[in-house]
Image (cartoon, rainbow, N blue to C red):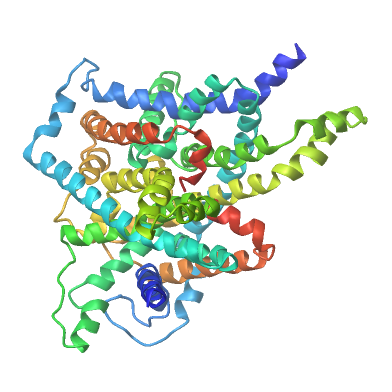
Amino acid sequence: MNKTLRKLLLGGPYMVWIAAFIIIPLFTVVYYGLTDKTGAFTVSNITAMGTPERLKALILSLILSLIATAICLIMSYPLALILTKMKTGATGFIVTIFIIPMWMNSLLRILAWQTLLERNGVINQILGALHLPKQYMINTPYAIALGMIYDFLPFMLLPIYNSLERIDPNVVNAAYDLGANRFQTFWKVIFPLSLPGVISGITMVFVPALTTFVISDFLGGSKVLLIGNVIEQQFTQVGNWNVGSGLSLVLMVFILISMAVMQHYDKDIGERTTIL
Amino acid sequence: MKKVLSRIYLAFIFILLYAPIAVLIIFSFNNSRTRAKWGGWTFHWYISMFQDGAIMSALYNTLIIALLSALISTLLGLLASFSLIAMKHKKRTVIMSLLDIPMLNAEIVTGISLMLIFIAVGQFLSKWGYTIEFGFGTVLIGHITFNLPYTVLLILPKLRQLNVSTYEAALDLGASRFLAFRKVILPDIMSGVLAGFMLAFTMSLDDFVITHFTKGPGFDTLSTKIYTEVRKGIKPEMYALSTLLFVSILVLLLIFGRGRGKKTTAVSQV
């Protein structure tokens, strides 16, 4: 009796929490998404995604988040390689340097890019002083992609860095000893071993980039809408929770696809520590 | 040559990451109400922010929510880790993946789902004349929910490394369960508990999306306040306050970061 009671006290609180605030809320979204205002079953909230304006937002979100993920990967991988090759004493410090920016309020950091990219912003003034052509990036999809890359770069860098750092140097040395050149060692040994980090990095960047509404709000003006904006407006401005939930369900399909891809590669749960 | 290239690359990334922060810090000293023009240096905003009631209450809400949600989620995460470690592998995997949902799901969906459940429960309760008020309580619940998977993530591996025999030895030597826990288990997992708490605190401090959907009118954290101010122009006090918070965290880290080795691994896990 005593033992079961202890088990209940230990496991009870968080189980209740998971049920009440993680699982049931998700089913609430499904319920609202599949019913109309009277509570009758309907799929019209799902098909509501089909309007040209919303489809355009969804496609743009997919394109921009894929581009941002790809660029984050291309930028982070060499960076992680450079960091792992540094002296061990310095790496802790160097890695911290990439985390420090996250302590400045994230909304303000994105907002700062507005100031940098504006027509008469900091970057254009520098370009002007150097007699270089000005850039007109603000309120375009390019600015949004830049914001995504900036905001989510550490999410790509840290898991890759962690997985690279875990590689046993003996394995790499063995490859060299057995006559592999640098290129072969990288493709046959280092890269495959870093794949779990790469996969976590990709999902950690892709999902937030796909679903953001803040970055597009701040850097796209009101001209460029992403699917996150469309859904957010349904809840806060239009007040139609049914349509908003239906659209979220469509969005969740894409999130589930990326989760499934990650699960496929990431079998060991312990590996999860590398996510952030 | 290769070394020079990698230095240049590091510098490029460094500029990319820190340029916006430099801009914000410089704005906090700008003697002009708008960020469109530069009016010379001033310390004014660092003083006037303390007289702005709305900003101070947003700061208070932000800090108290961060502190409480970090405390509660660390405690829940600790209980969860103990209960998870005792489970069979299969059951543990299932529960872990349920627990992971807020971490892997889009923030906007988590926010919406919490908002809807609060509305639904509120409607249900209204039959008996009760209401759910969107504000402090709902935001706190939201923050605990998204923090929970991270605290488990940092505490559970420490528990796994634990040697059960030492705990049993303590019991054999006459220690009470509580004493054995406090003297034997806790010191070993403390670094994970602390890292979990710190991560939860900083994530809560910086959260916008979940707060946006779970807050009610009249309740603001710094992030939601900034969001509503964007259209009409951010008050310069906001830059000053954020700079101050940023610098305080930095200083705190430098002070507590003395025991380098351990601390930095906690940070790099974060």
Snapshot quadrant of residue A37: top left
Regarding residue B211, the answer to whether it shows in the image is no
Residue extending farthest to the right is B174
Regarding residue B13, the answer to whether it shows in the image is yes
Front in this rendered view, residue A185 or B115: A185
Q: Residue A72's spot in the image, x, y percent? A: 31, 56
Q: Which image quadrant: the N terminus of chain A?
A: top right
Q: From the viewer's perspective, tell me whether residue A32 is left or right of residue B203.
A: left
Figure disc tally? 0
Front in this rendered view, residue B119 or B126: B119
Look at 20% across and 51% down and name the residue there.
Answer: A64
Look at 30% across and 75% down and name the residue there.
Answer: B34
Q: Residue A195's spot in the image, x, y percent? A: 39, 45
Snapshot quadrant of residue B26: bottom left
Residue B222 to residue B116: above or below: below
Residue B155 to residue A127: above or below: above
Front in this rendered view, residue B202 or B239: B202
Front in this rendered view, residue A13 or B117: A13
